[in-house]
């Protein structure tokens, strides 16, 4: 497995570390190679993602490289959503 890059989305389960009894998705910011680790382990910095894919927490994680599962990037929308203009009228105050 190669080095994780910024923007990669990974799934972390107990295969990556026992701390992930509840699997989480993480969008990688970067690997932290300056931190010395055991062979096969790596520190990563990233954002934990919720079910909608939004970042909810910034984390530094110690994981077994072989247990990290890369996830496919979400496909770009095929059709742009059409926005409707907002009707504006007089506003009554008071």
Image (tube, helix red, strand yellow):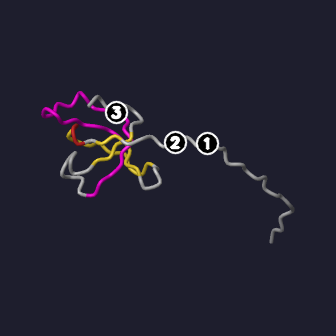
Observer-nearest of 6 and 69 = 69
Of discs 3 and 2, which sits in the foreground? 2
Secondary structure beneath disc 1?
loop
The answer to whether marks 2 and 1 mark residues whose Cβ atoms lie closer than 8 Å is yes
Q: Residue furthest right?
A: 90
Instruction: Say whether disc 1 or disc 3 marks the residue closer to the N-terminus.
Output: 3
Instruction: Say whether disc 3 or disc 2 marks the residue closer to the N-terminus.
Output: 3
Give the left or right position of residue 23, taking residue 6 as reference: left
Examine the image and state in which quarter residue 69 appears.
top left
Tag 1 residue: 78
Tag 2 residue: 75
Residue 93: x and y in percent read 81, 68
Observer-nearest of 36 and 63 = 63
Residue 47: x and y in percent read 38, 44
Examine the image and state in which quarter residue 29 appears.
top left
Characterize the local packing of mark 3: few (<14), some (14-19) or many (20 or more) Cα atoms within 10 angstroms: some
Q: Is residue 68 highlighted in magenta? A: no
Residue occupying the point 24% across, 37% down: 43
Distance CA(mark 3)–CA(mark 2): 22 Å
Range covered by the magenta-colored residues? 22-46
Characterize the local packing of mark 1: few (<14), some (14-19) or many (20 or more) Cα atoms within 10 angstroms: few
Residue 91: x and y in percent read 83, 64
Tag 3 residue: 30
The N terminus: image quadrant: top left
Characterize the local packing of mark 2: few (<14), some (14-19) or many (20 or more) Cα atoms within 10 angstroms: few
The C terminus: image quadrant: bottom right
Residue occupying the point 26% across, 43% down: 61
Picture layout, residue 77 above or below residue 20? above
Count of numbered tags: 3
Distance CA(mark 1)–CA(mark 3): 29 Å
Residue 90: x and y in percent read 87, 62
The answer to whether marks 1 and 3 mark residues whose Cβ atoms lie closer than 8 Å is no
């Amino acid at each position: 497995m190669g080095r994780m890059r910024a923007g990669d989305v990974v799934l972390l389960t107990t295969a990556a570390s026992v701390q992930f009894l509840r699997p989480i998705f993480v969008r990688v910011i970067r690997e932290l190679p300056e931190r010395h680790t055991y062979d096969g382990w790596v520190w990563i910095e990233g954002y934990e993602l919720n079910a909608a894919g939004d970042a909810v927490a910034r984390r530094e994680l110690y994981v077994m490289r072989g247990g990290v599962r890369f996830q496919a990037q979400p496909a770009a929308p095929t059709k742009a959503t059409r926005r409707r203009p907002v009707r504006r009228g007089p506003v009554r105050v008071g």
